[in-house]
Amino acid sequence: MLPNISRSQVKDSHRFSAFGQLLLIGIALAYLFVILLIPAAAVFYHAFHKGIGEFLVAISTREFIHAVQLTLIIAAIAVPVNTFFGLCAAWVIARNQFRGRTLLMSIIDLPFAISPVVAGLMIVLLYGRSGWFASWLNSINFKIVFALPGMVLATAFVTLPFVAREVIPVLEEMGTEQEEAARTLGASDWEVFWRVTLPNIRWGLLYGVLLTNARAMGEFGAVSVVSGNIAGLTQTLPLFVEQAYKNYQSQAAFAAAALLALLAVVTLILKEILERRTKYRKVDSGLPIN
Amino acid sequence: MSIVVDNISKQFGSFKALDRVSLEVREGTLVALLGPSGSGKSTLLRVIAGLESPDVGTILIDGRNTTHLNVRKRNVGFVFQHYALFKHLTVRQNVAFGLEIRKHPRRQVKDRVEELLDLVHLRGLGDRYPSQLSGGQRQRVALARSLATRPQVLLLDEPFGALDSKVRKELRAWLRHLHEEVRVTSIIVTHDQEEAMEVADEIVVMNQGRIEQVGTPTQIYDHPATPFVMSFIGPVNVLPNTARLFHDNGLEPLNEEVFVRPHDIHVQTSANGVKATAIVQRIIHLGGEIQVALALTDGQTILANFSREQFDKLKLTYGQQVFVKPKAAKSFPLPKSLL
Amino acid sequence: MIDQLRVQQPLTKASRKGINSVSLPWSITISYLALMLFLPAAALIAKSVTVGPVDFWRIATSQVALSAYNVTFLTALLAASVNGLMGTLIAWVLVRYKFPGRKLVDAVVDLPFALPTSVAGLVLATVYSEEGWIGQLFAPLGIKIAFTRLGVLVAMIFISLPFVVRTLQPVLQEMEKEIEEAAWSLGASQFQTFRRVLLPPLLPSIFTGLALGFSRAVGEYGSVVIVSSNIPFKDLIAPVLIYQRLEEFDYAGATVIGTVLLFTSLILLLLINSLQRWGSRYAA
């Protein structure tokens, strides 16, 4: 009697799940459609609905081109600097056992937890006109806030954790045996790094660089605080989007938005490819702490 | 090249991995470091390689003090348990690594690599990546890689530990053969006594960071120097000297602990002068041998091993009463402090 | 035992022997963190100290600030909760069910991470405006979304969507299907199985994802500043308030609110850390 009951229940639950499955999939897809896909589609619709001509006009203004250039310059400085730092930090954490190791990891993750506006505020308080270094910066006639250096600093701040976070687990997974083997075969520290460590962590590193770059080119809040947002001077592409929208230049705003959205799509595609390379699905892209 | 380890100690936190260890390995021999995990054998090997630096003590390789010499300058071949092959390089590139680091001419590297691939019977697999090889093949690549630079000494850290037992046996025989061909002074770390016995000229038994005994396989097995060696090498029954196995047979061992190998237990089905009795508890067929568990009258259980022939003669059955006596027994002097 | 020793040995060794080879990456890491993190944080704290405790309290608890906290935290909590529920559902569907386009949907979940926030703000303000694709559906009912608190909520839901999904996915993937089948074979219904067997081990991850999403929503600026009308006591959030204070060169005002937000983030970080420790308590 007893086995009979439980068997029929098992069967029931299977029948329920066949029906419920469709329901759950339907709800999930509908939610994602409304929250993510409609807005994503709207970006491209509004950028192109007046035709490609209007789009091309919008992206060939002087302000637009300057914004693109500035965005690229900032990323070109912040990304390599943070990549270098990230590699050092990852090595320190993954290859050494010391007290405060987890604390150091949390500290590196801090920029993800801090509001970008607060990050920008800190930089203003430090280098702004009433900041700690104000008189010294004045005396050497070097401007950080409302100028390129401040924007690079703000960008580097918000993208600081990415590379270290991606490289630490890969280094840990790699282990130390290959490096030891290389040393017994006569390789110097430098040769070990270039010939053994780097090739082993390259996909994880690229993944981190990819995320750093996406965030660096897209950062708005922190850069907005320190930039002064002067068109043609300290305006990056994300800032251009807001400015154009506020000025009712909706075509220009959406043209810039479409370009940035394209960057996002390319990032997601590359991310997918790299995830397949590293063969593990990762939880991250902006999550504080692992 | 000879290796001399002189009074080496090494501590990890509060754990004493090596405690004043001294050892001499003669040129051209193959020595096994044998011991349970945590006995310090791997640490000793890593200290010799230069992958760990000792807290105190000296290492001499070929009479030269290498204690503080960087690993990369020591010219030792090291083979890791999990192979440690460079995953991003092909078999050929792995083997060539050490030669390229030393900036040997391209032509010479190529010839040497082919020579080594022949030596380890992997000629056709040079262009494969490590992930495309079986465990046994990987370990042979690792060996070829470590031999490529003609190291002064070859150090193997549990080289067959990650392989299944069949492959392990094949590789052991092959390693022995290889050593006869190449004749480089070698130290192999293992926790498998059978492996040590089969491969090594000399065995160093280690326990808790110290060396218990150094000797040839036969010496170690037949004349164990300490209770630890006795019980670590081969199966053994450990009995108190008050056991009825001795007492009933009129034996009175002096030391408290007495060691009797299972094949040194004599069993007969009728008394004939043997006074200790036991009941057959379990009969286990181990292929060529048969092991019988015997319950003595004082509650002790001992194991006895028989050849198939002996066993067939005895015709033992479960619950049968038999008469037992030790053919040989060994005991060790107690540590002085206890006397 | 062997493995433990093996892992432990090289690490201990590296830290001990390599004093000279270790120091370069070490000093780079520490100095960079000092320059990029500690120094700016010190500037913020020092500035708020010079404000003085009395003024600090007055500014931190002024009416406009209190209302901004209210909008920020309550809306962020609501957004995180919505995604706690929907994120769990999405993670479940993505891990457990096979359907055409699953891979694509999985990749799309990361869109809010990849899309610059000003783009999100722009498009949400457009889509949810009274003439927008979605906004026009609500307009006849008298519901305005863009430029109201509802707009803030929509933006926060958008940017915090991936967190629960991405924290839950690996946990779900590791959960064996047999656990569920074992519960069925013991006579549990579908609902009982979910509530008593599946949900408990998932809860820590759900809460971790929820807290991460909340933390992100609290600090969010770019999308909200565009989709909201930024009117005090209506839909003004704390980060925008900081920005407005800075524009008025009221550094003290900005610093005080900024310090409040900074410490909120730190407390959230501690909470998330302990949630993760709670989540790994059954880990082998």
Image: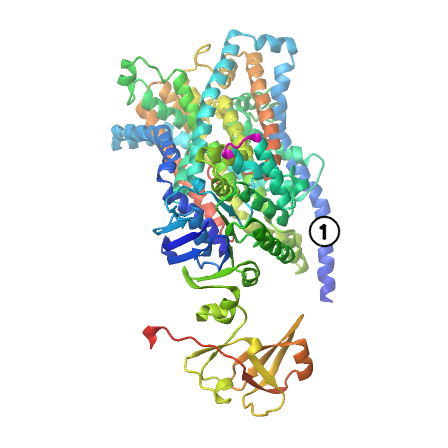
Decide whether residue B104 is among the magenta residues.
Answer: yes
Q: Amino acid at mark 1?
A: His
Q: Is residue A202 left or right of residue C19?
A: right
In the current view of this chain or complex, which residue is farthest to the bottom? B272
Q: Is residue A205 left or right of residue B209?
A: right
Segment colored magenta = B101-106
The answer to which of A83 and C4 lies nearer the viewer is: C4
Q: Does residue C104 appear in the picture of this structure?
A: yes
As drawn, B279 above or below C165: below
Label 1: few (<14), some (14–19) or many (≥20) C-alpha neighbours in 10 Å: some
Residue shown at 53% from the left, 44% from the top: B146
As drawn, A33 above or below C94: above
On the image, the x and y values in percent for residue B324 come to 57, 85
Residue shown at 40% from the left, 54% from the top: B5
On the image, the x and y values in percent for residue C186 come to 66, 61
Q: Is residue C113 left or right of residue A190?
A: right
What residue is shown with label 1?
A14
Helix, strand or loop under label 1: helix
Q: Does residue C75 appear in the picture of this structure?
A: no
Report the coloring of the rendering.
rainbow
Majority secondary structure of magenta residues = loop
